[in-house]
Amino acid sequence: MRRAHRHHGFSVLGLALLLASCTEIPTAPTPDDSVAYSQLDLRVGSGPEAVVGDLVRITYTAWVYDQNAPDFKGNQLETATVQFALGSGQAVIAGWDRGIPGMRVGGLRRLVVPPALGTGLDGFGVYPPDTTLVFEIELLSIDSLATDTAEFSFTELVIGEGVEAVSGANVIVSYGCWLYREDQPDNKGLLVDTSEALPFAIGFGQVIEGFERGVIGMRVGGRRRVVVPPELAYGETGSGLIPPNATLVYDIHLLASTEP
């Protein structure tokens, strides 16, 4: 929803195993300011193939490009694990969206990424500005972001005893949001968003329509499961980890409601 889904927590960097280097080289050495993007498979995986729209989990090691170093690996910058929706713009490095499609789970690929596809002129964090980078990326897992279809519905999990949420009321809710999957318990596929305390006013378009419909009529203390089809959610556009035409499942807890 407009407020509930603008920030997702799935691009979280963590510790990862240091990847083994390989003696193959992707291109012949060239001056750093003219190095082109390139990729080389060091190990071809045997698992599913990554395509744009998948949620991928990778472990990677990054180096500064050095034309005089073995495999062009200069100073090592970091080793980490990250998860993101491929092709969504969530990748820390834009070149990953170009270099990961076509990899299979278990595969290892080396990317040479010039600044235009990396950290740009400014750099960030441990990455220096205007610098060509070398990455070795292992594809750990793939989750599909596809959903099944369903109509709008809601199920009362707990009937609240407090003030009723009506049009015009200011409410505070906590919630979890999952992609709708018919083959999963409670139809909950991948968890794509959560909030411990989301305030909004009912009837003012501050959240997606299906979420607003799902809250109306709840009483404080109540819990409700709401199925929201794409036409009442993010439609053909999607948002973050939520793909286009996605049906969603929300578990909503109404924490507070004021009379309008």
Image: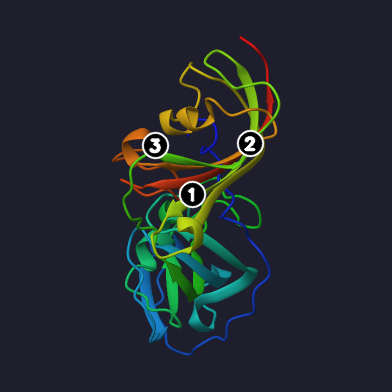
* 123 to 198, vertically: above or below: below
Q: Looking at the picture, how far across and down is residue 8, in whole percent?
A: 55, 46
Give the foreground label among 2 and 3. Answer: 2
* 224 to 134, vertically: above or below: above
Horizontal arrangement in the rendering, residue 54 relative to residue 201 (left or right): left
Q: Which residue is mark 3?
A: 233
- Local packing at callout 1 (Cα closer than 10 Å; few below 14, some 14-19, many 20+) is some
Give the foreground label among 1 and 2. Answer: 2
Give the image quarter of residue 11: bottom right
Measured in 3D between alpha carbons, the distance from the residue under mark 1 to the one under mark 2, in whole angstroms, is 53 Å
Q: Looking at the picture, how far across and down is residue 209, in whole percent?
A: 42, 28
Q: Looking at the picture, how far across and down is residue 72, in whole percent?
A: 50, 77
**Residue, x 42% and y 55% (percent of image)?**
117
Measured in 3D between alpha carbons, the distance from the residue under mark 1 to the one under mark 3, in whole angstroms, is 34 Å
Measured in 3D between alpha carbons, the distance from the residue under mark 2 to the one under mark 3, in whole angstroms, is 25 Å
Q: How many marks?
A: 3
Q: What mark, if any, has residue 120 been given in the picture?
A: 1
Horizontal arrangement in the rendering, residue 119 relative to residue 36 (left or right): right
| Kind of residue at disc 2 | Ile
Q: Which residue is mark 2?
A: 159
Give the foreground label among 1 and 3. Answer: 3
| Kind of residue at disc 1 | Gly
| Residue 74 visible in the displayed image | yes
Circle 2 — which element? loop
Of the image marks 1 and 2, the number of the one nearer the N terminus: 1
